[in-house]
Image: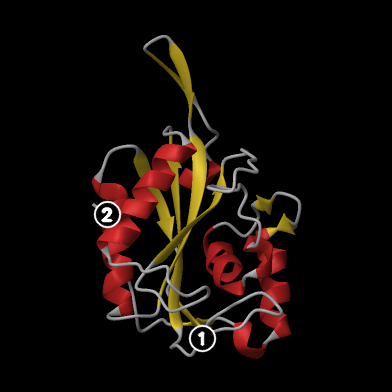
Amino acid sequence: MTASDRMPDRTATGGHMLVEHRVVFSLGSNLGDRLDNLQEAVDALFDAPGLEFVACSPVYETAPFAPPGETIPEQGDYLNIVVVADTRLPPENLLERVLNIENSLRRVREVRWGPRTLDIDIVVFGDISSDDPALTLPHPRAHERAFVLVPWADIEPDVLLPGHGRVGDLAAAKQAEGGPSACRRRDDLALQQPA
């Protein structure tokens, strides 16, 4: 049985039942040393307790993305990965960790759809749904983003993205569209898995 085949389990602590959730992160960088930024982010995600590493996708390169009708400022291409982990932490704690990591890598939010040293999105958090603007789950635009779907499909092609279908099918459809949103796998680049 592989890590991705495991069912969530429950552990009693302090009189409460904690459910283990599968969490999917999408990471991207297009400023500075992009690969180093991604490596620092992966290391930081797992430096603190509460996350158990499952898998990291290969590195992909993609053009900057914005929804139809939005303007993309001039900027370079992104390096993107997807990281899968298991956790018993609540979503709010992981969001706080993600924001702290972005801040530590000097993430600036001055220009919408602008370049960034690091962007980390929580794509799904188990089967939790949330309309909270601070953390909408599942990520409301994940199904539109080849840079999320294609790396994720390398890890978990048969997983369902709630409301949209099988990740492998969604990734194949996005790649078939081609154009600037297509992902280019960078087999010449690799990240170290967290210890």
Q: Position of residue 58 (x, y in %)?
A: 43, 71
Which is more N-terminal, label 2 or label 1? 2
**Residue at screen point 23% across, 52% down:** 195
The type of residue carrying mark 2 is Ala
Mark 1 Cα-neighbour bin, 10 Å: few <14, some 14–19, many ≥20: few
Element under disc 2: helix
**Residue at screen point 31% across, 56% down:** 101
Image quadrant assignment for residue 158: bottom right
Which residue is label 2 attached to?
44
Q: Nearer the viewer, residue 68 or 54?
A: 68
Image quadrant assignment for residue 37: bottom left
| Mark-to-mark CA distance, 1 and 2 | 29 Å
As drawn, is 92 to the left or to the right of 156? left
Q: Is residue 110 above or below residue 90?
A: below
Is residue 42 visible in the rendered image? The answer is: no
Element under disc 1: loop
Q: Position of residue 143 (x, y in %)?
A: 68, 63
Q: Nearer the viewer, residue 80 or 131?
A: 131
Q: Position of residue 151 (x, y in %)?
A: 53, 68
**Residue at screen point 64% across, 52% down:** 159
Q: Nearer the viewer, residue 153 or 97?
A: 97
Which residue is label 1 attached to?
73
As drawn, is 163 to the left or to the right of 27? right
